[in-house]
Image (cartoon, rainbow, N blue to C red):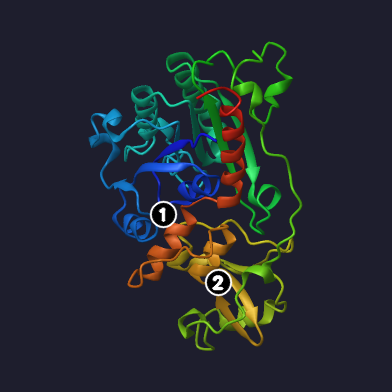
Amino acid sequence: MTQLSVGSLFAGIGGICMAFSNEGYTVKWANEFDAKACETYRYNFPHSLYEEDIREIKHPEKLGYVDVITSGFPCQAFSIAGYRQGFYDQKGRGNLFFETARFIDAIKPKAYLLENVKNLVSHDQGRTFKTIKNILTQELNYSFIPFVLNSKDYGNVPQTRERIYIVGFKDEGHVVADLNEDINDNLFLDKESYSAYFEIPKKIDLVKTIKDIITTKPVDESYYYLPNHKYYSKLKQEMIREDTIYQWRRVYVRENKNNVCPTLTANMGTGGHNVPLIKVGDKIRKITPEECLAFQGFNPNFSFPPKLANCHRYKQVGNSVTVPVVQRIALNIKQALLQFSL
């Protein structure tokens, strides 16, 4: 069987790369600018990592041809947690989508996969999403298949995490789907196209539970809340179950009653209302960065550099993807591409 290749933009610590590698792809290269994320990436992956601002890579084709380009371009500019400036983000993050488009145009892969926050669809009354669609379809001539997946429903991972994914195939710019539309319902779809053979992943049963993720081994004392902590008495009063996850939400304790982990965020390691908490016996503690990796479905052999501070570990996991979800997408892209001779 022909082995497909992939190149990863805004690779972070390599969640998307791991997902594609798990499905038999060869990861040829990746790009990431954050120095601490690069430390973790290099600690786990042997292939080429270009640690530089993507805007400084003037000739993307020199990185080498790949069959698939993936891009988890920065979502801050589109997130409901940010200022919602989109393409006009003053820090220049929103326009990094255009760098992804530049790479696709230069390398001309057979397919692409984009990942971002769900709010990308509604930002600026839909104009941001429309611009992305028009560039990919009208200017680059790739199909446009968007869909939103929740990790707990599509990855057998007990975490609530909704993300939008967009898949497209080369020379199929006429194929444009609405959000979560089954592309095969398109009566005008060319059955000799890759898009015709791509399927959006279907829901699967959630079998794993929080208890499958949380370690039973002792963890460092630094993760525990001590009685002298200003929130300890309130946490002690409200946190009564060991089979659920709690959060401190500024002035109250929130119990996640759906028995899954709340969405892991990049700023959970800085303290405050985003820290996931659990009750272990008569003690209260944060979930560890390693448990966060498990809630993102990372391979068990993935690890952080030994000297990396916890604040960076939490941030990196929160910025990453749920590996099993992306892996299912990678499989379906592969099955579509292998319908024809490569």
Q: How crowded is the residue under tag 2: few (<14 C-alpha within 10 Å), some, or many (20+)?
A: many
Regarding residue 122, the answer to whether it shows in the image is: no
Q: Amino acid at mark 2?
A: Ile
| Image location (x, y in percent) of residue 326 | 57, 44
In terms of depth relative to the viewer, which is nearer, 221 or 122? Answer: 221
Which tag, 2 or 1, sits closer to the chain's start? 1
Q: Residue at x 64, y 42 (%)?
A: 149
Q: Residue at 72% of width from left, 13% of height from top?
A: 187
Q: Nearer the viewer, residue 234 or 287?
A: 287
Q: Position of residue 96 (x, y in %)?
A: 36, 34
- Relative to 224, say whether 259 is above or below: above
Q: Nearer the viewer, mark 2 or mark 1?
A: 1
Give the Cα separation between the discs numbered 2 and 1.
19 Å
Q: Secondary structure at mark 2?
A: loop
In this rendering, the answer to whether 267 lies above or below 173 is: below
Q: Where is residue 42? Give x, y as percent.
A: 33, 57
Badge number at residue 13: 1
- Number of dots carrying numbers: 2
Rendering quarter of residue 146? top right
Q: Nearer the viewer, residue 269 or 254?
A: 269
Q: Residue at x 47, y 25 (%)?
A: 110
Q: Is residue 100 visible?
A: yes
Q: Amino acid at mark 1?
A: Ile
Which labelled disc corresponds to residue 287? 2
Residue 92 rendering spot, x and y as whole percentages: 32, 37
